[in-house]
Amino acid sequence: MISKSYIICSCIHNLFRTFLIFSSECRSLRASTLVNPPLGFIPIF
């Protein structure tokens, strides 16, 4: 039986990894926006 703390830690780890990937993608999108405003601007909301 898997302990509850292990499940919580894995969930936090997955959320943190997803947040890091999302923030890096936003950073690259922002850089492309500075280089090429008409094509690089993609709102993510």
Image (cartoon, helix red, strand yellow):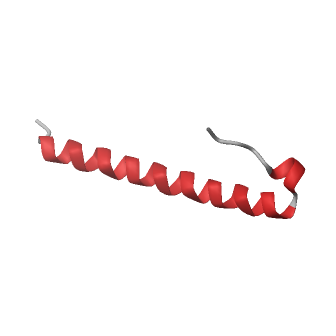
**Quarter of the image containing the C terminus?**
top right
Q: Residue at x 59, y 59 (%)?
A: 24
Question: Which quadrant of the view contains residue 11?
Answer: top left
Viewer-nearest residue: 26 or 45: 45
Q: Residue 34, position in %: x, y? A: 80, 63
Q: Residue at x 74, y 63 (%)?
A: 31
Question: Which quadrant of the view contains residue 23?
Answer: bottom right
32 on left or right of 19:
right
Q: Residue at x 40, y 53 (%)?
A: 16
Q: Residue 28, position in %: x, y? A: 69, 60
Question: Which quadrant of the view contains residue 7?
Answer: top left
Q: Residue at x 85, y 64 (%)?
A: 35
Q: Residue 9, position in %: x, y? A: 24, 50
**Quarter of the image containing the N terminus?**
top left
**Label total for image:** 0
16 on left or right of 27:
left
1 on left or right of 9:
left
